Image: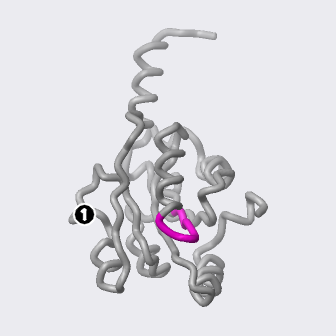
Amino acid sequence: MNISSKILTLTDLLLKIQDLCSEGKTIVFTNGCFDLIHAGHVDYLNAAKGEGDVLVLGLNSDESIKNIKGKNRPIICQEQRGMVVSAFCSVDFIVIFDEPDPLNLICAIKPHVLVKGDDWGEDKIVGADYVIQNGGRVVRIPFRIDISTSEIINTIINKYAGYRP
């Protein structure tokens, strides 16, 4: 599959999902910023893909990330973040969203499986109630690699403060 063909509008994604569901495919949804890609992201997305047939990634837009994480984020723009995660074999489709959370996407997509990291309690996972009420399940993926984008940024700031190439 062509990398750019993985990034869809919600309208186009819903048409694809309708076809995939009619083929009996299990749709998995997860979301995130995926600002500075690291091994934890790769492991997480591979595990999420293992929960079904098709992995849909809701990618927070630049504006959404600014609202959630502050004016200095994202580091990488949404077009480039989308390009990077679309190169992952585990990711089948990507939809970029502007809201602070993916509830509208989840309600539109109606995934069979909703995946988040186990740092989220099930009662805090946006859309969990909706997915369960519609016969789906929620999976919390344990983090096996201890790294985060925030840690990477802090390491760069602390280790290279004053560094000039």
Position in image of residue 130 (x %, y %): 32, 79
Q: What x and y, as percent, mark residue 96?
A: 56, 63
Is the residue marked by circle 1 packed among few (<14), some (14-19), or many (20+) residues within 10 Å? Answer: some
Residue drawn at 31 percent across, 71 percent down? 128
Indicate how the structure is coloured in the image: one colour
Does residue 153 lie above or below 65 as drawn? above
Which of the pair 23/68 is nearer the observer? 23
* Extent of the magenta region: 51-57
158 falls in the magenta region: no
Residue at the spot 45% in from the left edge and 29% down from the top edge: 152
What residue is drawn where x is 39% and y is 30%?
151
Q: Quadrant of the N terminus?
A: bottom right
Q: Nearer the viewer, residue 109 or 80?
A: 109
Query: In the image, residue 84 lies at what x, y percent?
Result: 65, 47
Mark 1 element type: helix
55 inside magenta stretch: yes
Disc 1 residue type (three-letter) = Glu
Q: Position of residue 16 (x, y in %)?
A: 65, 80
* Residue sitting farthest toward the bottom: 22
Classify the position of the C terminus by image quarter. top right
Q: Is residue 70 above or below residue 14?
A: above
